[in-house]
Amino acid sequence: MAVERTLSIIKPDATRRNLTGKINARFEDGGLRIVAQKRIRLSREQAERFYAVHAERAFFKDLVEFMISGPVVVQVLEGENAIARNREIMGATNPANAAAGTIRKDFAESIEANSVHGSDAPETAAEEIRFFFSGLELVG
Ligand code: RTP
Ligand code: MG
């Protein structure tokens, strides 16, 4: 197994409910290390660019509105198989389908307001990390 990095976002529904610490504990208890982290507000342009892959989907407009509705915490998680591991810790996109003990099962409000984002593959992880963090912000 390889040590990987993945991009995580704690979404506005979770920052609004003051869940950053509880969610970070799930990552750390699950074997991931938070190697970079910042709390920001996405502009509409940034949210549209970040989710450009979903631009043709019916939920795109709502998703962008949601992602700019409050602050988010963007972070880089590191660990063995971090991309897949993080997706396990998050649970399924729709909290109704998420396994017991996952972040989305325990905290998500809906399929849209589902508390966290995680990269889905090595290429997207690298691209998403670069989107939010400069090399100077990424320490080992
Ligand atoms: P994410 O990218 O946020 O980690 O989540 P994901 O891979 O599990 O889900 P994805 O299919 O990439 O969708 C991105 C985000 O769009 C919102 N969504 N809304 N209303 C809907 O049917 C719907 N479907 C997806 C969610 O916030 C999802 O995480
Ligand atoms: Mg996705």
Image (tube, rainbow, N blue to C red):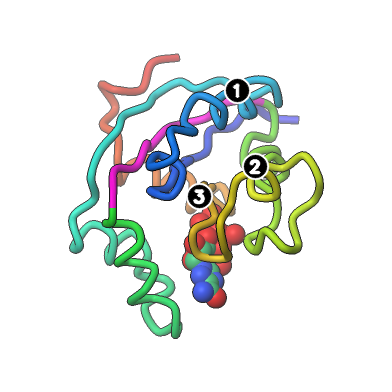
Nearer the N terminus, badge 1 or badge 2? 1
The alpha-carbon separation of the residues under discs 2 and 3 comes to 11 Å
Say which quadrant the C terminus sits in.
top left
Tell me the residue that label 3 is attached to. Answer: 117
Mark 2: amino acid: Ile
Report whether the residue tagged 3 is closer than 8 Å to ligand 1: yes
Q: Where is residue 102 in the image (x, y as percent from the top left)?
A: 72, 42
Say which quadrant the N terminus sits in.
top right
Q: Residue 27 is drawn in which quadrant?
A: top right
Please tell me the numbered disc located at residue 103. Answer: 2
Nearer the N terminus, badge 2 or badge 3? 2
Q: Do the residues labelled 1 and 2 touch (CB within 8 Å)?
A: no
In this view of the protein, which residue sits in the foreground, 24 or 70? 70
Q: Position of residue 127 (x, y in %)?
A: 39, 49
Tell me the residue that label 1 is attached to. Answer: 25
Mark 3: amino acid: His
Mark 1: amino acid: Ala
Q: How crowded is mark 1: few (under 14 residues within 10 Å), some or many (20 or more)?
A: few
Q: Where is residue 63 in the image (x, y as percent from the top left)?
A: 39, 68
The alpha-carbon separation of the residues under discs 1 and 3 comes to 16 Å
> Residue at image x 50%, y 65%?
112
